[in-house]
Amino acid sequence: NSAGEKMIAKGIKEGERKFIMTLEEAQKIGNIDFLFFGGDMVTGYGERGLTGPTSLENVKKFKATLDNYFLGTPRQFMAGGHELGYVLPLSTDPEGGPTEKSIQIFEENFNQLYYTYSEGRYKFVVLSSDLEMMSGGTESMIQRQKLQREFYKDEITYTGPEQKVVLMIHDPNALAPMFNFLEPNLDKIEKTFSGHLHAQWATQLFPNLCTLASSQLLELPLKPLFDKYFPGKADEVWAYYSQYRNIDKIWKSVKLVTIPAPGGIGGIGGGFLLADLKPEGIEVKKIKAPKE
């Protein structure tokens, strides 16, 4: 409806303004060797990612804005749900989620969906969380998921003793299905960076929600609230949160750091990260969103 469209348009305009302010702040720092973007960089077509009529226009605008401040600076991109398409418990679009088309558009306009690159002794392994978390799908998409899993297992397994792995994945919940493989390889992982949660404080909040949802003692009193606020989907939402009841342990094990969005969550926790790739370790500093 028109009211909803106006609210979305207002949110997009606000996001663009904060993005520009963040670029201005980063430009003041200087001596930035390369930029990395953690996904959800442009407005997608609902749950279908960059497949809508204005998608390419949005990508062009994003790149032009970036070039105004960092023309010529090397950059790497990670796909998020807004680029590939997403499926959540409250999703309503039967055609939502990553598709061959949305992946093709991302790769044509940004870079490969999953890949590695090295900076000094650090091997960055960049993955698609949407692909990793996908359950079911077309034969070609299932094959893509299989190939990505083979890719990161090979890249991490055969990392030399002189190198350290830096995992880059948009939605940190994707680390849960990966953890059976990651756990015996934790000594190779220097850090893990994710976007999606928008602010570091959400990394503490989300596991608490998952713990509550997995508690049998709380299920009886809380279920009526879920029924009220998620009519027809209460069981699905409850199951979504409860499946991640051990996510806090996983995140700590892989040394997770959240890449903040320029606006954070509701204006709280916004900014960007500076990562100094020192031989003895990666020093991460958060730069808060500039004051207006």
Image (spheres, rainbow, N blue to C red):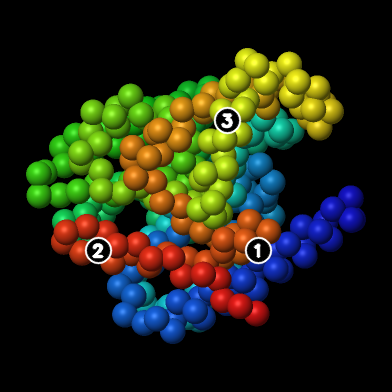
Q: Is residue 64 above or below residue 216?
A: below
Helix or strand or loop: what does disc 2 sit on? strand
What is the spatial separation of the Cα atoms under label 3 and label 1, in whole angstroms?
Answer: 24 Å
Picture quadrant where residue 26 is located: bottom left
Residue 24 lies left or right of residue 233; in this view the side is left
Picture quadrant where residue 70 is located: bottom left
Q: Amino acid at mark 1?
A: Gly
**Residue under label 2:** 277
Q: Is residue 186 above or below residue 167?
A: above
Q: Is residue 95 visible?
A: no
**Residue under label 3:** 210
Query: What x and y, as percent, mark residue 157?
Result: 19, 34
Judge depth for marks 2 and 3 and give the one in front: 3
Picture quadrant where residue 21 is located: bottom right
Helix or strand or loop: what does disc 3 sit on? helix
User: Which dot marks residue 267?
Assistant: 1
Query: What x and y, as percent, mark residue 290?
Result: 56, 76
Counting residues from the N terminus, which is met first, the one under dot 2 or under dot 1?
A: 1
Q: Is residue 69 visible?
A: yes
